[in-house]
Image: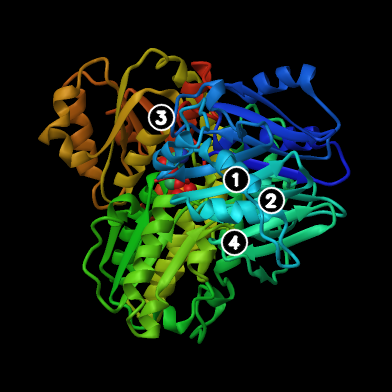
Amino acid sequence: MCGIVGYIGTREATEILMSGLERLEYRGYDSAGIATIWEGNLHFVKAEGKLRNLQEKLKQNSNPSQIGIGHTRWATHGKPEERNAHPHIDNNNKVGVVQNGIVENYQEIAEELTKAGYQFYSETDTEVIPNLIAKHLAAETDPNPSSYETPLLKAVQKAIADLEGAFALAIVAADYPDEIILVRQQAPLIIGFGLGEFFCGSDITAFLPYTRAVLNLENGEMARLTPLGVEIYNFAGERLKKAPKTLNVNPILAEKQGYRHFMLKEIHEQPGVVRSCLRSYINRDWLEKENPDFSPVNLDLSESLIAGIDRIQILACGTSWHASLVGRYLIEQLAGIPTQVQYASEFRYAPSPITPNTLTIGVTQSGETADTLAALEKEKERRSNQDPQFQARILGITNRPESSIAQVTPNIIDTQAGIEIGVAATKTFVTQLIAFYCLAIELAYRRQNIPNSRIAEIINGLFALPNQIETILETQEDYSEELAHEFIETQDFIFIGRGINFPIALEGALKLKEVSYIHAEGYPAGELKHGPIALLDAKVPVVAIAQPGLVYEKVISNAREAKARDARLIGVLPASDSNGSKVFDDLFAIPEVEEILSPILSVIPLQLLAYHIAARRGLDVDQPRNLAKSVTVE
Ligand code: AGP
């Protein structure tokens, strides 16, 4: 949500800022802007809408500055108009600020500043910040500044003492042409270390082509970037010693590689990332041993994290919440541990009563979702007076182990999906599911809740999945594209599933509404008759996920009930199911697997359908309106 980029070094800043913004555009795309310093002046260019509008403007406004900050915006305060675009500049055109997050008390600050003669031109919460810094710079009279402090750093330090909320800031000032000041408070900000040049970004993608040596600022920290190096401070102005680390990230992941959209590319990456996640965590040697004395899964979870747990609560939002619902099913059915799944945004204000042997799991693809991080922080705080083992029982599941969730909990399962650029989560969802299979097997094995022979069956089934996903992509892609033609004008869709495939119905509906703007709802198939069936007629297609197993016959009956109301029925069924297929008007035929493994396969045709309908409608699939990849505001 909002992307920040910054550069200081020996190259032309504008080019580096713009290439950073291109890679950050998935975080927000309502407006964009950059500020540079050249010949003692602050230059800024901003444009409403997509980045290409800013690119056009820069053709007439560029300069060879070697320092600058840039921003791509997801509107919170104020409409997506040019005057609300970042950078925001103080009244004297001296200080430029880009911000991610929200300053909650900006109105009070604006009132104070207005009384002192400052004027405001935007509707944003950000505009108070450059003016506040300018005010402190003007009043900077400290006769004995400590050796490290520069007037700009000091003025920023004083300004942020007045700010309440969650924010990440990058600041430049015309009179200090050799420094960028960074501030992090509950919103991500990462520094990149090059050779004689330094970068910052709200995500590593901002500077991935230039360096993989990074330092993640922590909440309550500031940094000063100069052409000579990086200094880190806490908000009290004390210098901190910190060293960068090198990330093992493939920059190719942030390129489209010939695909029309990132979403399509990421759908096609799924066999590979599922394979890689399984190989990372499942020990296939275990299958070969008669009486293995080691675990089939190696998630590197400490004893203190999981020994003796009798309850699990999972906190997540959106697609990660859907993955968590599948996770609950797996943990309860395989490991026998009662599990709750809560929306992180709801949990924050109404947490369940605390019990000592509860393991809390936060699930997030970005690792930056404000609601999920705040819910986990809340959980940590609630546990802070308890015994150390209880305090330790917090785990994160993410594909971004370098992100903020790692600052909340050191216990992370990296789903191995890598960076996902398309706003609609696809590969990160299936790998979150694989992480849950691994966790459920690990817990089931430790508790001896199911026989080893059953664990072996499931593991063998899991290793067959990557090839089966490939089969679906080969056989169903063209079909889903053709089918998509028929739904260009459709206004409503219903998705139904039961048991372990109910969350897949929710996910199918979310994917479709996110990228195609078609209204879609997911229901447990048995609930259709309790209300939603009133919506059905010939204009409302129903997608039913019917996989052999416990609830197969029930789903088929529920689908028939929909057909009796004239709904067009689309089935997601095993290719081998010749009887079931007669019920449906259209069919996604997928390889047959046992029910407990079926979500991983059922979701693929639904992703393809959502993608192709949106692409057919000519929509911006990777950057759907009003959405952002990392939701870093509450
Ligand atoms: C997924 O397609 C959505 N873009 C959205 O629901 C997302 O899953 C949600 O915002 C949570 O994000 P997270 O996984 O990064 O925490």
Real-space Cα distance between discs 2 and 3?
A: 48 Å
Q: Which mark is residue 528?
A: none
As shown in the figure, which amino acid type bears the numbered disc 3? Leu
- The answer to whether the residue bearing label 1 lies less than 8 angstroms from the nearest atom of ligand 1 is no
> Is the residue marked by circle 2 packed among few (<14), some (14-19), or many (20+) residues within 10 Å?
many
What's the amino acid at mark 4? Glu
- Which of pointers 2 and 1 lies earlier in the amino acid sequence? 1
In the image, is 70 to the left or to the right of 552? right
Instruction: For marks 1 and 3, give the one nearer the viewer.
Output: 1
Which residue sits at x=37%, y=22%?
A: 518
Lower position in the chain sequence, tag 2 or tag 3: 2
Q: Which mark is residue 133?
A: 1
Q: CA distance from mark 3 to mark 4?
A: 40 Å
Which residue does the numbered mark 2 point to in the structure image?
152
Q: Amino acid at mark 2?
A: Leu
Q: Position of residue 87 (x, y in %)?
A: 62, 34
Q: Amino acid at mark 1?
A: Ile
Q: How is the image coloured?
A: rainbow
Name the residue at 56% across, 29% down.
29
> Decide: marks 2, 1 in contact (CB < 8 A)?
yes
Closer to the chain start, of discs 2 and 4, is 2
Q: Which residue is mark 4?
A: 221
Q: Secondary structure at mark 3?
A: helix
